């Protein structure tokens, strides 16, 4: 197993995740099987209880793991399926060590950060790196490890020390380190001092970079590269310039141009590994597809505008997978994507906090958009704004996709305005609501008290109903009988109202295995009005866009028929 660690210096949030996934992708194009591990030095066991407004989206895996959003990047770029153990947190490591201590496994020793915590980290990495993650079912050959935060933080110290020890444990031809740094441009001059300081910090902790990836808003000058090489004690071929490009999808090609793989292959002795003809061809095909995708991206001139009506719009990372699924779909439709961010409270006339100008601006965005998306969310704030947006989409034949909360919103709107239960809502927003007319109710089988890891989570199957041949969504899934997607919710459509709702034309075309739980809705005689109780965005892949999102974007761009005629809608499904 070859380990490639990606760490960061200077500041966080400069694209370490994208760099790490792009590096992994390049290894794949050479024909290798690649996996990845993300280390998050926070104390939380997982991302499940963290506010999206503080930490960005909580990503959900097949096994129900609620993890850091970077794992989404890896799955999307590398087309792999990770497990909850691929996200290491301080919380997970400490609780495993404390559990062993309570069991007496340390035989009377004093349990310490070094060596017990650092050993636990290394054992975890070695164990998890071997888990098969792609459809070959074989052990991966290369493991990318992304260390969250910046080197030098108090929190990350045990992980840095564990990696320092690890490089000797696995041997230097099995270990490479890429340090991501920032080169700011001040008064037109590219400044190298922050990078010099970051590398000094790294070396003082016993780690030396094999490559320094420099993020910069503009192309790095030759003199800057030379200077970084000289002051940071690396050759110029070890300094990689990662300037801003048209999209994050261009980053792998940017790294390739700079011969990053040449250096890493040598360092990791990859030339000595004999790959099968099949693996090499697969790798080459992947590169070809990726190049085509980026050129499609650059040649998409017509715009498709989607209004994203949500409640966490002030931190775009809260909707990272949703944005990515929209991007994948837009590239597939050869359209330039424009997202109009609409904070749902701004659509509410009666909200005291909303200025009249914000209200009009928000409605202007909604009315100008080609399609409307209501993504997932929790709590009652902003609900009425979302209901108003769903009503507008339904009544005006505007493409609508509701994801999880967005499905529940579409049901609330329909029950109120078509069935006439005026005050109907979800028990999430009003626990006292009338159980006979509440649109959305608590699922009987979820824990109502404990918050961490207690929702209906992870992959479950959804069966299309027998009379759903007409459904556009089903056609988008290649006419499949059932689909497998990831879930994260506590509430569901009130079973008591199903017949009434369906009799008025809003059809629940997909249900769970028991057929009692409503998973998919679609409105008849509408351009595209779809809701999914699951989160299709989590399984969207760069080269295989999520079907509900593809439907929304295609319908919004006016090319749904064309997309439905295309041959590559075969649905493979995941288990
Ligand atoms: N709050 C809703 C529920 O728990 C929707 C969840 C979501 O959108 N992820 O069912």
Image (spheres, rainbow, N blue to C red):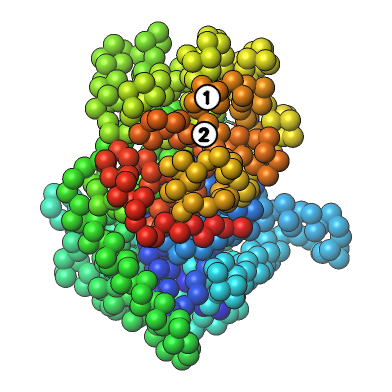
Local secondary structure at mark 2: strand
Residue 534 screen position, x and y as percent: 55, 41
Vertical arrangement, residue 539 with respect to residue 123, above or below: above
**Residue closer to the observer: 354 or 207:** 354
Q: Quadrant of ligand 1?
A: top right
- Asked whether residue 349 appears in the rendered view, the answer is yes
Q: Earlier in the sequence, mark 1 or mark 2?
A: 1
In the figure, residue 259 lies in which quadrant?
bottom left
Question: Residue placed at 62% from the left, 21% from the top?
Answer: 497
In the figure, residue 281 lies in which quadrant?
bottom left
- Asked whether residue 66 appears in the rendered view, the answer is no
Vertical arrangement, residue 393 with respect to residue 132, above or below: above
Q: Which residue is mark 1?
A: 411
Give left or right: position of 421 versus 260: right
Specify the quadrant that holds the C terminus. Answer: bottom right
Give left or right: position of 413 versus 305: right
Q: Which residue is mark 2?
A: 521
10 Å crowding of disc 2: few (<14), some (14-19), many (20+):
many
Local secondary structure at mark 1: helix
**Residue closer to the observer: 385 or 43:** 385
10 Å crowding of disc 1: few (<14), some (14-19), many (20+):
many
Specify the quadrant that holds the N terminus. Answer: bottom right
Question: Residue placed at 68% from the left, 44% from the top?
Answer: 513
Question: Residue placed at 67% from the left, 56% from the top?
Answer: 93
């Amino acid at each position: 197993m070859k380990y490639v660690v990606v760490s960061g210096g200077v500041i966080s949030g400069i694209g370490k995740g994208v760099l790490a996934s792009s590096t992994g992708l390049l290894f794949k194009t050479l024909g290798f099987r690649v996996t990845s591990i993300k280390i998050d030095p926070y104390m939380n066991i997982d991302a499940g209880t963290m506010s999206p407004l503080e930490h960005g989206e909580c990503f959900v895996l097949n096994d129900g793991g609620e993890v850091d959003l970077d794992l989404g990047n890896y799955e999307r770029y590398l087309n792999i399926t990770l497990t909850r153990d691929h996200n290491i947190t301080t919380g997970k490591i400490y609780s495993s060590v404390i559990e062993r201590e309570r069991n007496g496994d340390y035989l009377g020793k004093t349990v310490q950060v070094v060596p017990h915590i650092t050993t636990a980290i290394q054992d975890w990495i070695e164990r998890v790196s071997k888990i098969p993650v792609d459809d070959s079912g074989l052990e991966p050959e290369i493991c990318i490890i992304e260390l969250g935060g910046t080197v030098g933080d108090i929190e990350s110290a045990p992980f840095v020390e564990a990696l320092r020890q690890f490089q000797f444990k696995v041997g230097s031809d099995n270990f490479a380190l890429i340090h991501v740094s920032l080169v700011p441009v001040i008064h037109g001059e590219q400044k190298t001092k922050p990078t010099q300081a970051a590398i000094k910090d790294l070396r003082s902790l016993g780690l030396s970079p094999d490559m320094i990836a420099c993020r910069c808003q503009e192309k790095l000058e030759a003199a800057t590269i030379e200077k970084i090489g000289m002051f940071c004690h690396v050759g110029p071929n070890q300094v990689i310039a990662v300037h801003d490009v048209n999209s994050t999808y261009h980053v792998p090609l940017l790294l390739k141009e700079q011969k990053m793989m040449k250096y890493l292959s040598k360092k990791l002795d990859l030339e000595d590994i004999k790959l099968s003809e099949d693996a090499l061809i697969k790798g080459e095909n992947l590169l070809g597809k990726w190049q085509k995708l980026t050129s499609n991206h650059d040649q998409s001139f017509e715009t498709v505008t989607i209004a994203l009506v949500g409640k966490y719009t002030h931190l775009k990372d809260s909707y990272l997978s949703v944005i990515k699924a929209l991007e994948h779909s837009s590239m597939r439709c050869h359209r330039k994507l424009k997202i109009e961010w609409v904070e749902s409270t701004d659509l509410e006339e009666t909200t005291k906090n909303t200025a009249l100008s914000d209200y009009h601006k928000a409605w202007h965005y909604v009315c100008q958009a080609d399609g409307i998306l209501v993504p997932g969310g929790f709590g009652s704030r902003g609900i009425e704004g979302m209901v108003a947006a769903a009503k507008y989409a339904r009544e005006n034949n505007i493409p609508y996709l509701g994801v999880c909360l967005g499905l529940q919103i579409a049901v609330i709107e329909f029950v109120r305005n078509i069935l006439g239960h005026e005050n109907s809502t979800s028990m999430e927003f009003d626990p006292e609501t009338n159980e006979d007319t509440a649109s959305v109710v608590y699922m009987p089988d979820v824990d109502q008290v404990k918050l961490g890891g207690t929702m209906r989570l992870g992959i479950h199957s959804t069966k299309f109903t027998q009379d759903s041949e007409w459904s556009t969504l089903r056609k988008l899934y290649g006419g499949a009988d059932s689909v497998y997607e990831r879930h994260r919710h506590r509430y569901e459509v009130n079973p008591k109202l199903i017949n009434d709702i369906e009799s008025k034309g809003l059809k629940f075309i997909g249900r769970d295995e028991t057929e009692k739980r409503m998973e998919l809705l679609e409105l008849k005689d509408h351009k595209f009005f779809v809701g999914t109780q699951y989160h299709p965005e989590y399984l969207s892949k760069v080269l295989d866009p999520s079907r509900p999102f593809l439907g929304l974007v295609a319908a919004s761009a006016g090319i749904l028929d064309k997309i439905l005629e295309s041959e590559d809608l075969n649905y493979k499904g995941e288990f």
